[in-house]
Amino acid sequence: MAGTGEIITERRGRAQWITIDREERRNALNGAVIEGLHAALLAADADPEARVIVLTGAGRKAFCAGADLGGGAAVFGDDADRPTTGFGRLARAMREVGKPVVARVNGACVAGGMGLMAMCDLAVVADHAQFGLPEARVGVFPMQVLVYLRGMMHPRHVNELCLTGAMIDAARAREMGIANEVVPYEGLDAAVERTVARLCEMSPVALRRGKHVIAAMQSMDFAEALAFAEGQIALVARTDDAAEGLAAFNEKRKPRWATDDEQG
């Protein structure tokens, strides 16, 4: 286990866990947390021994309560000399990560915390967690969070959360398409480990290429997306993982991915 004061990183089997360690501040975001998450994410993506990345918060009260408003408005735009924000740079990095990222939502997931959760590929949620976008209560709006949520939820649900600031429970979050799985807090880690195990059975190459395709298709119309898909399936079918996967299927055995062989 390693830490930078606000971020803890830990290897658990084939998963690299990244934890926001500000339980006393409900794991709220400040400049140091955002930069720490960014660095930890890049390190995990570059680590050949990590197959999955798990993002969570310390304790059981909050996954992330959004921006730490004790620092004033600077948390929303940290450097006027730069055209991008720290949160935006983190979002761009998250989009480029080639490994599955699982949000372990251990408690309240609010404002920028919703953004972090939405950046992840999957979300496993404790049943006591609550979700909300209350930014308008303090005179701002969840602008950057919308970039992710608008493609994840029905527009009416997005409007409900953004315009009313209403909080919803975990069951409602699953109905809205935010959560993949909702479990009692006591079973949260076991549920995350089951998800990690399923992901580790998949081809790392296929997941990396697949994540790229999912992201790229979001801005394409039907004809463009179909033509892109036709080229991508031809490429992925020529990889070593595809050859191994097909051989394993025909030989009725589990595939041995190159990444697994490298780790013995």
Image: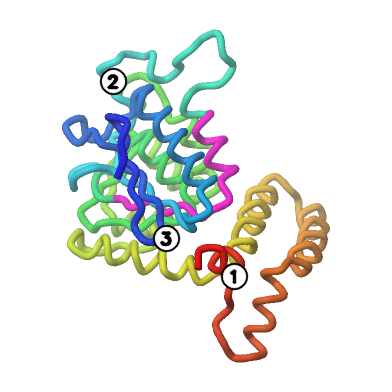
First in sequence: mark 2 or mark 3? 3
The answer, for residue 164, to whether it is visible in the render is: no
Q: Is residue 157 above or below residue 264?
A: above
Q: How many marks?
A: 3
Question: Is residue 104 a member of the stretch shown in magenta?
Answer: yes
Q: Nearer the viewer, residue 133 or 164?
A: 133
Say left or right for 138 vs 207.
left
Q: Residue at x 41, y 40 (%)?
A: 116
Local crowd size for mark 3, using a 10 Å CA cut-off: few (<14), some (14–19), many (≥20)? some
Q: CA distance from mark 2 to mark 3?
A: 36 Å
User: Residue at position x 72%, y 75% from top?
Assistant: 243
Label number found at residue 123 = none
Which comes before the other along the chain, label 1 or label 2?
Answer: 2
> Where 68 falls versus 106 (above or below)?
above
Q: Residues within 10 Å of mark 1 (few under 14, many from 20)?
A: some
Cα gap from disc 3 to disc 1, whole angstroms: 14 Å
Judge whether 239 appears above or below 250 on screen.
Answer: above
- Residue linked to disc 3: 14
Query: Which residue corresponds to mark 2?
Result: 69
Side of 61 relative to 135 (left or right): left
Q: Which amino acid does the dot numbered 2 rest on?
A: Leu
Q: Position of residue 7 (x, y in %)?
A: 32, 35
Q: Tell whether position 228 is magenta.
A: no
Give me the C-alpha separation between circle 1 and circle 2: 46 Å
Residue pointed to by mark 1: 257
Lower position in the chain sequence, tag 3 or tag 1: 3
- What is the three-letter code of the residue carrying label 3? Arg
The residue under the point 46% across, 52% down is: 101
- Give the mark toward the camera: 1 or 2: 1
Nearer to me, 11 or 179: 11
Q: Are marks 1 and 2 in contact (CB under 8 Å)?
A: no
